[in-house]
Amino acid sequence: MSFVRPHFPILALSLAAALTTACGGAGSPSLSPVAPSAVGGGATISGQLNSASGAPLTTNSFSTMETRGVTITVVGTGISTTADNAGQFTLNNVPAGTVQLSFSGAGWNATVTISGVGPNDHVQVTVTVNGSSAKVDSEHHSAPDNNKREFQGRITSINVIARSFEMSGMVVNVPATAVLRHGDKTMLFADLKVGDHVEVRGTKVGTTITATEIKVEQGDSGDDHNATSELQGLASALTGRCPSVTFTVQSTKVSTNTATSFEHGTCDAVKNNVRVEVKGTKQSDGSLLASRVKVEQGDAEDDNHEFQGRITKINVIARSFEMSGMVVNVPATAVLRHGDKTMLFADLKVGDHVEVRGTKVGTTITATEIKVEQGDSGDDHNATSELQGLASALTGRCPSVTFTVQSTKVSTNTATSFEHGTCDAVKNNVRVEVKGTKQSDGSLLASRVKVEQGDAEDDNHEFQGRITKINVIARSFEMSGMVVNVPATAVLRHGDKTMLFADLKVGDHVEVRGTKVGTTITATEIKVEQGDSGDDHNATSELQGLVSALTGTCPSVTFTVQSTKVSTNTATSFEHGTCLVAVKNNVRVEVKGTKQSDGSILASRVSIED
């Protein structure tokens, strides 16, 4: 269908009810459509005429008051009528074929074209006129003897999975056999966009149309829709079920649907850490709707392949971290970079997004090169913290060592300064004062370490660390490479509470006072802190992002946000929605809760993004 376009943008507005009466006064008689001059069989065209008044195009600038008395004529015939006070008109006995309607009156001289008018067709149109320009906002054809009709309007909603869209209050189903065109170019269903003006030919039952042909015009925000984008890289954060999956490439969200073609594989070949080339149309939220996905041939298990994801856990002693369900071993020969800057293993933080090149065997990668991006909680690097106490759990080699002070992990690097000694003066059970910047995993990257002078081997000194092994028969445990003997006379306390030797657990952080000979301590007093699965419950964590991998039944559901597992229960509060209605995959949420021993979060509050 073709029609005369206005030379300015016009807001499509359909007025279904009679509006204010004419400006000629309350006593003006209502105007009825003038009877057409032709007589005999033919089509009927009825419609609603709106005026943009030449004013700024807001909702209030459309008026039917200026349409009364406007003459509507079928060009080339003697068929005409006059719009009534509500801007409504009817033309009878219109010949079949392509019809031009002329609108004339005071200051008005415009035409529109309506094609495909059939014998005995009933055509309903809504037209907006401004001076010499006119635009068809909606058009419905309904021939009594044929249920194949034409309809037009703007797409208001698209259902990719159902291959359907809504338009002018109707649902349009688009089977794979339907032809979609924009000018001379064939289009895919995936190319349709909310706001596009379309002309649909098909069969209508109730308010549902099954399309056979769709002609697409440019949408209001059409430039984005013609912007074809291409990108390539490793797929990550894969969710959904083929053919409708969502994944990330180079920080850009990519979605596929039934119209997406896959090269060198099927949709099932798209997996995390598989390299892909994507071509598609950019969406209003910055994501890409893929028209084609090219899956890189070869196996991700090959030597020196690439993998990417977010670090979820770091093992300092083993020089490894976990990412996307894989363990990455980082030998000393591996190169770590952030932009043009070389990094140390100690600089890695939970939450960092990394691209790893290396050899993968099973779920273990041995890295040769790691490119590090800023973690989501990068602002923590500006938070300066200070603490003092005994060093324990010392690992690494100077100048890059890691140790624990008051349950906080401390890391040093070439930029760390040492007072009252060198890096080599930092030893287990030596008292230190540390100043540095807090990292996203709660650890401290030290800018300065002050080493306490004196010897920690004196009688009745203090030592601290985590219990790694308990010998119940010998009443001893191992801590920071030392054996601690606990005689019956030793006092064991947790806060103000007296404890028994049997209450000690592997993982408890303890401060031991006693006499040390070699690597053996004979304790006189032991202060016990909560183990790994205790204090973490008091550590409040916050994160935000898209929900994925949702399972369970409300109120007890489990889902993933930024690679972190989140659980809810009856005590969880939900803001801006309920658990049942609002928590869905790909919905953005803000989560606040307590970190659990397995690294997950038990949510106390989930805020649903509006």
Image (tube, rainbow, N blue to C red):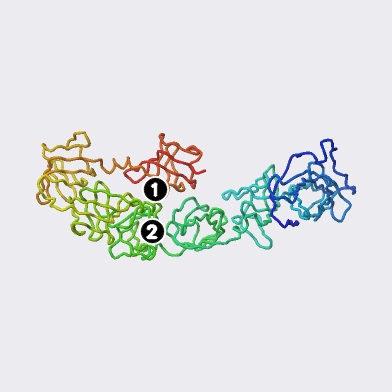
Q: Position of residue 237 (x, y in %)?
A: 44, 53
Q: Earlier in the sequence, mark 2 or mark 1?
A: 2
Taking the spot 84% from the left edge, 52% from the top edge, the residue there is 74
**Quadrant that contains the N terminus:** bottom right
Label 2 crowd bin: few (<14), some (14–19), many (20+), radius 10 Å:
many
Q: Position of residue 413 (x, y in %)?
A: 27, 59
Give the answer, above or below, for where 446 lies relative to 122: below
| Element carrying mark 1 | strand
Quick one: 486 or 269, which is closer to the camera?
A: 486
Q: Which residue is mark 1?
A: 564
Q: Position of residue 87 (x, y in %)?
A: 79, 44
Determine whether label 2 and label 1 are within 8 Å by CB.
no
Outermost front residue = 420
| Quarter where residue 477 is shown | top left
| Quarter where residue 34 is shown | top right
Label 1 crowd bin: few (<14), some (14–19), many (20+), radius 10 Å:
some
Give the answer, above or below, for where 488 lies relative to 261: above
Left or right of residue 183: residue 400: left
Taking the spot 54% from the left edge, 53% from the top edge, the residue there is 285
So how many labels did they put on this image? 2
Left or right of residue 503: residue 189: right
Taking the spot 50% from the left edge, 40% from the top edge, the residue there is 582
Marking on residue 269: none
The type of residue carrying mark 2 is Val
Q: Which residue is mark 2?
A: 354
| Element carrying mark 2 | strand
Q: Position of residue 569 (x, y in %)?
A: 40, 36
The type of residue carrying mark 1 is Thr
Q: How far is mark 2 from mark 1, CA to CA?
A: 16 Å
